[in-house]
Amino acid sequence: MAMVSPSLLSADFGNLQRDVEMLNESECDWFHLDVMDGVFVPNISFGFPVMAAMAKHARKPLDVHLMIVQPEKFIKEVKALGAAVMNVHYEACIHLHRVIQAIKDEGMMAGVTLNPHTPVDVLEEIASDLDLVMLMSVNPGFGGQKFIPSMVEKTRKLKQLLERNNSKALIEVDGGVNRETGRLLVEAGADVLVAGSAVFNAADPKAEIIALRNL
Ligand code: DX5
Ligand code: ZN
């Protein structure tokens, strides 16, 4: 059993309200919103006005994934959206501990995201401060990429690190997640699966969400 956070990056942007309503009716747990700045990642997605439009219709918690430099500049804006989870990249934060505390001070769950090459060990000293750790299982910037197989073992390592530090942080995995890779991730300890193309390209997205939840 896993939680599922469908990525709206794979939605039909010409029919966003329709796709948000589809997710409202589905069994999904969260809405995953991918923000890109063209600097931290080689792509630009959408920003606050578009997220506010989605938030207006969304009836599930928002899981905001900031693939931007200096994400600490936008804590208040993410809070204003009504987000439940704010995910910042380890690689984008010079003073990560301070950023985590500031997110928690706003009453949001603090999530730290690691790029595929970043070892889980960098979280050893702050593991017990975190509400969530998200592992990228593709290089961030685009939907529809191929899952990096070694991220299954990395998920296992992260699970051990969190247990060792008595951390209750959830493990979320993002990128190339489908029924096959999702099963391996859940076995390795993943709590939350992000899925963009697997959900939105499915013939029956709601059935795909149920299949992913039941892994
Ligand atoms: C990638 C994004 C992901 C992406 C996942 O940079 O962070 O959330 O939308 O898309 P799929 O599931 O298609 O790999
Ligand atoms: Zn994402």
Image (spheres, helix red, strand yellow):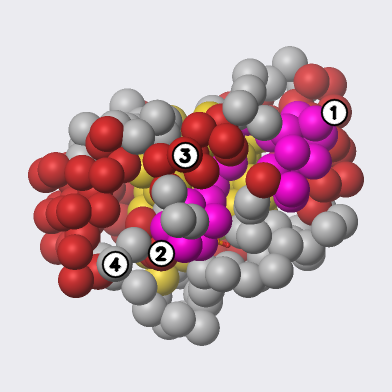
Image x and y of residue 164, in percent: 83, 21
Q: Which residue is mark 2?
A: 10
Which residue in the protein does label 1 denote? Answer: 160
Q: Label 4: which residue?
A: 12
Q: Determine whether the beta carbon of the residue marked 2 sits less than 8 angstroms from the nearest atom of ligand 1.
A: yes
The image shows residue 48, relative to residue 164, as above or below, that is below
Disc number lying in front (1 or 3): 3
Report, in whole angstroms, how far the alpha carbon at label 2 lies from the one at label 1: 32 Å
**Quarter-of-image position of residue 46:** bottom left
Distance between the alpha carbons at the discs numbered 4 and 2: 7 Å
At horizontal 86% and vertical 38% (from top left) the residue drawn is 157
- 206 relative position to 58: left or right: right
Q: Residue furthest front?
A: 203
Q: Are marks 4 and 3 in contact (CB under 8 Å)?
A: no
Residue at horizontal 56 percent and vertical 69 percent from the top = 144
**Nearest-to-viewer mark from 4 and 1:** 4
Disc 2 packing (10 Å; few <14; some 14–19; many ≥20): some
Q: List x then y, in percent, for residue 170.
A: 60, 28
**What amino acid is labelled 1 in the image?**
Gln
Local SS, label 1 = helix
Tell me the magenta residue range: 180-201
